[in-house]
Amino acid sequence: MVQKTKEYHKLPGSKKGFLIGKYTLWQGADHLLQVYSRVGVEEYKRFYFNDIQAVITRKTAVGKIQNIVMGCLVLIFILPAISLDGGWSLFYAIVPAAMFLLLLVGLFKGPTCETKLMTAVQTEKLHSLHRLKNTFKVMDRLGIQIQRTQGTLKREELDNISVRPMTNQGSYRQVQQRTFKKISRRHEKGRAHLGLFLLLLIGGVLVSLGFFFTHVILTIISSIASLGMGIFVIVALVKQHDSSMSGSLKAITWASLGFICINFAAGYVINIVFAMQNPGVVYNQWEMLKSMSLLSPWESPLKLSFDIFAICGALFLGIPGLFMLYRSDSGLKAEATETAVNYRKPAALRNTEPG
Amino acid sequence: MINSNTLGTCPSCGGLLRADVFPALYREFPTIRSGETLQMANEAGCFYHPRKKAVVPCSACGRFVCDLCDVALNGQHLCPACFEKGKTKRKIKNLENQRTCYDTIALMVATVSILIYWFTIITAPFVIYLTVRHWKSPTSIIPRTKIRFVLAFIIASLQIAGWIFVFSNLFLLSKS
């Protein structure tokens, strides 16, 4: 009986997309196949072993940050579990236990990285290779396969890379394309971002004030600030699209959207719980607002956890956001000057081309 | 750092990097092929460019093609028409960059519809139809079995059986 050979072999590592979808990597006879599967549709990208020029892996701090945040959340939620009694204690024990499990999984998976594959005409991110452990396994395996197809680099060629990394045939073209891209990308001042991060900080301060005194005015201002955050985050996301803003600033804006959504959802849950506990005020919105405003975080464990989360989120996103915005603004000014100088001198670049 | 299979510090940005570099980085770009012009009367010409010299027959249709029209793919030489036909009719696997996986869709419809159980009255027959209609359709390029179709079929059959049971009971109740 003729045994059917597998055309593709799965390589270690996979990555989930933002809400749906999954990236995986498969090894074929003469190429690497990146598969993006989402709701019954699969998209393929092929990289032929013969065309691969380089694979660059850069260690990132994403995993470390995720673990620190998860650790902080475990600590935040474990305190009420120890101090409270009854059903709430059980709830506060289950939540950090689940988070602790996630933290363990994150620690087991190891440090994160970003992997990019380079050919003569493209630089593509390999999404599934985002953990160093898996990337090393895959690269050890792929390296042999690619070298079998292309041969090995000579010692002097390797030395050349460290001396002059930009002297291959495409160098002038690549520099020109990069310059063009920089020029063609829209410059965004980041006013919406500034508004968002300032509102986040104001929101954090207002929630902190609730620990010391309660008043209906404070609740109204907090609600207006939350509404403003919702509006500013959407405007900021629209404005940053296809702009020259840094990736980290874009990422922190997306994280702010996540935080605001969770904050809205949690606020809604608190309202429902409060309404169930105080059925007498449900039909009078003003009375309900007043009663909720007078509720101190020290009296309700649910409100206490919500406030801790709101303060942590607002400060962790607001302060770095403002800092990044300031850096991005000064960086852009310097880059604009540099681009203007480089764009005026294409002849100088042409001289560096071999031949 | 370069081809050392370990992480090293980048001299430019200070980040930890591993770089695997291959000889393709130093390869010369292929020169643009223009096709050789016919020199003698008894030489075979290209089907698409009669004035150009034919260099190879198309592996699919046998037409003579010049250097300019020759598309080398998977060890075969194809003419532009056969290449285009192979791409649109999905006969050349290596040119496909998207596929619809009906088995995944069938299983998803069968399972998700359970959440809104009364919806299964419509989705169950649809899942049976998808399974039968696309049983032989190509699914994913990557290796997979028919387990999704089988599971979807079983779940949909159970849902239909459930509805038959419900309706027969209602019928008997109304009769009694």
Image (tube, rainbow, N blue to C red):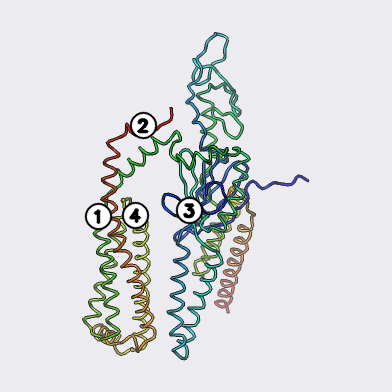
Disc nearest the viewer among 1 and 2: 2
Tally the marks.
4
Lower position in the chain sequence, tag 4 or tag 1: 1
Q: CA distance from mark 3 to mark 2?
A: 30 Å
x and y percent of residue A271 in the render?
A: 34, 81
Q: CA distance from mark 4 to mark 1?
A: 12 Å
Residue pushed farthest right? Answer: A1
Q: In the image, is A218 to the left or to the right of A306? A: left
x and y percent of residue B114 in the render?
A: 53, 68
Quick check: B96 above or below B173? above
Q: CA distance from mark 1 to mark 3?
A: 33 Å
Residue under pointer 3: B9
Residue under pointer 1: A189
Q: Residue at x 62, y 45 (%)?
A: A144
Residue under pointer 2: A350
Is circle 4 on the same chain as circle 1? yes
Disc 2 residue type (three-letter):
Arg
Residue under pointer 4: A246
Is circle 3 on the same chain as circle 4? no
Label 4 marks which chain's residue? A
x and y percent of residue B145 in the render?
A: 64, 54
The numbered dot on residue A330 is none
Q: Residues within 10 Å of mark 2 (few under 14, many from 20)?
A: few
Q: CA distance from mark 2 to mark 4?
A: 29 Å
Q: Residue at x 59, y 70 (%)?
A: B162
Which quadrant does the C terminus of chain A fall into?
Answer: top left
Disc 3 residue type (three-letter):
Thr
Quick check: A4 above or below A267? above
Disc 4 residue type (three-letter):
Ser
Give SS at disc 1: loop
